[in-house]
Each structure stands twice: as structure tokens, then as C-alpha cells.
Amino acid sequence: MSSQLIAVVGATGTGKSELALGIAEHINSVGHKAEIVNADAMQLYRGMDIGTAKLPVVERRGITHHLIDVLEITQESTAAEYQRLARAKILQLQESGIIPILVGGSMLYVASCLNNFEFPDRDQELRAQLEAELIEHGPLHMHKKLAELDQIAASRIIPENGRRTVRALEIVMITGEPFAASLPDEIESWQPVLEFGLRMEREQLLPRLEKRVLKMWAEGLVEEVSSLIPAGFRDSKTASVAIGYAQALGEIDGELTREEAIASTVQLTQRYARRQVSWFKRDDRIQWLEALDTELLAKAVELIDIDGILGNRS
């Protein structure tokens, strides 16, 4: 049975959006239709453009993009809610004869959409207690607390990401089991998917990520954050802790110099990319492609033809 869903995943900075656009254009050119469904957690937010490398509408080549700019910065984004939104959109597109292309590197968001698993229920009282503790003691304290209960979960979360740490703590404390125990031992697909993964050698990727961060500051990331403050950016549980945005806010508040903010963002971005690589390596559905291959799109199209997505399986 051929897939009617395509996914493009991989580390940040590997060119996922460009490949997805090329695939969509190819599908449209042969008489079918494809549209893109965003799987980047921070691109869900209106106003967060520069720091998320969100493609401007004029650069989307007429390809419709979904689940971009659907949240206000004061709203909390969760993988559980994303699962509901993304699956509903994918099914809607498929029912209309449109092939969805899921694109992004937010690991748990991608998994929540593509894989079969249910999220543990929330405990609002426990969550409130943990968030109060986060405010009082900071993210590093909470990360240490998580490490004492679940070392594996802690190793997968950046210590500065207090929100993710709190969510993992909540799951561990509700279930009495490690966070990983809430995920299935084996990947079980929600529906058939042709999943592409972009990879790049570390010595090539890390300098690209540094240049990307420098470009964000040059394009006005600090000014973008300043413009979001009146809308409640400081009180956001999700947006305000995003890599780059938290550091830009630190620069605005005088807690970091520009050089320190940029250096911290580079370090965290590179660390995040390493975790993305490790995460996606575990997914044996992925068809890996070299991000810098000059024949990248042609090889992806060949795999699409082999899979039979366009109804021409030989």
C-alpha cells in the first residue's frame, strides 16, 4: 500500500523547507496537488518570524502552508494539542485529494503526529506547583530534579528549557514511571508515511548554524522580540524560552551583552541539532538523504515514484 503522507525531518539548518517546496512543486507539476503542514513548534506563533527562520509568504512559491501563525505568543504550545491539530489537518487534506507534506524538526511534535501513542493526562494542581517551583528556583534546579528521577529524560532536554523539564517531571510524577515509559518501545505508524531525513556532516552543519544565528541578529531578532513584549511575550510559557528568543530578551534586559546572547544561542542551537540527529536516527522509516547533494530533489522524487504515492507504482 502506497503512502498518502510525506514527511521531511532532520536537524535545524539542513534545508528541510527547501526540499519540501521542491517536492510539492514536483507533485503539482505532474497533475496532483501537495501542501505543507508545519511541524516546527515555534513557527506556530504569530510574530515569531526571524528567530524561527519562518519562510515569508513570498518565498513559499505559491505552495499553501498550514499550522503557521496559528497561536498568539501568550498561548501554550504542547505536543498533545499539536497532535490533534496536525492530524485533523492531514486528514482534511487527504480527503480533498491533497498530499500533505509534514515538515519540521521539533522532535516530539513530529513523533506525536506520525506515531501511535497517547499522552498521559495532565494534573493541573501538580503542574501549578512545578511551575511555581520553576519561577522560584529556575530551570537548572528543575533539570537537576528531573535528572534525579529520570536521567534519560533529563539528557534529552536542554537544562535551560524549564517548560519541557516541568512537563517531563509532571509525567514522571503522575505515572510513577520514567518519561520514556510513556512512549512506545517500538515506532508504530499512525498511517503509512514516506519519511525523508536530511543529514549533514557535523563539521559542515555547525558553522552553518553559527552563520544562521548571526544572520538572525543582523536581520533584527532583538527588535522582533521588543515588538512582542507589549503583546505579553515575557509571560509566555513557551515562546519566551525558545532558543534565541530567550537570549534576545536577556540582551534587552541587560542581563547579557550582544556577544554573550549570540554565543549562547549558537551553543544551544548546535546542542539542539545534535539531539535532533540522535532522535531521528532511531526512526527506521526514514529514507536518509545528504542535505548538500546536488541531486537531492531528484533522489527524493525517485523515492516518491517508487513508493507509488502518485499512483504510478511499477
Image (cartoon, rainbow, N blue to C red):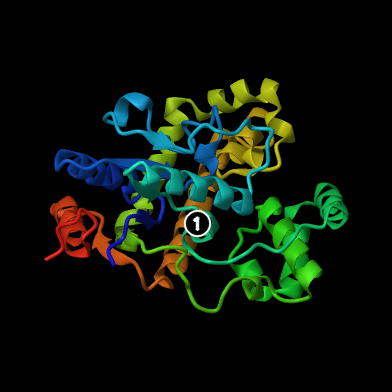
Q: Is residue 155 above or below residue 294?
A: below
Identity of the residue drawn at 66% across and 62% down: 119
Q: State which quadrant residue 7 falls in.
A: bottom left
Total residue callouts: 1
Q: Is residue 124 left or right of residue 279?
A: right
Furthest-front residue in view?
95
Is residue 23 positioned above or below 4 on the image?
A: above
Which residue corresponds to the image point at 62% horizontal and 64% vertical from the top-left?
A: 118
Residue 312: quarter of image: bottom left
Which residue is identified by label 1?
113
Q: Residue at x 43, y 26 (%)?
A: 219
Q: Can you tell which quarter of the image residue 305 is in?
A: bottom left
Query: Could you say where residue 113 lies in the image, as x and y percent from the top left?
Result: 50, 56
| In this rendering, position of residue 129 left or right of residue 96 | right
**Relative image position of residue 188 (x, y in whole percent):** 47, 72
> If the image is split into quadrants, where does the N terminus sit?
bottom left
Q: Residues within 10 Å of mark 1 (few under 14, many from 20)?
A: many
Q: SS for tag 1?
A: helix
Question: Residue 126's x, y, as percent?
Answer: 86, 57
Amino acid on which the number 1 mark rests in the picture: Cys
Residue beneath the point at 81% across and 54% down: 127
Expressed as whole percent of the image width and height from the top left, the position of residue 156 reads 58, 66
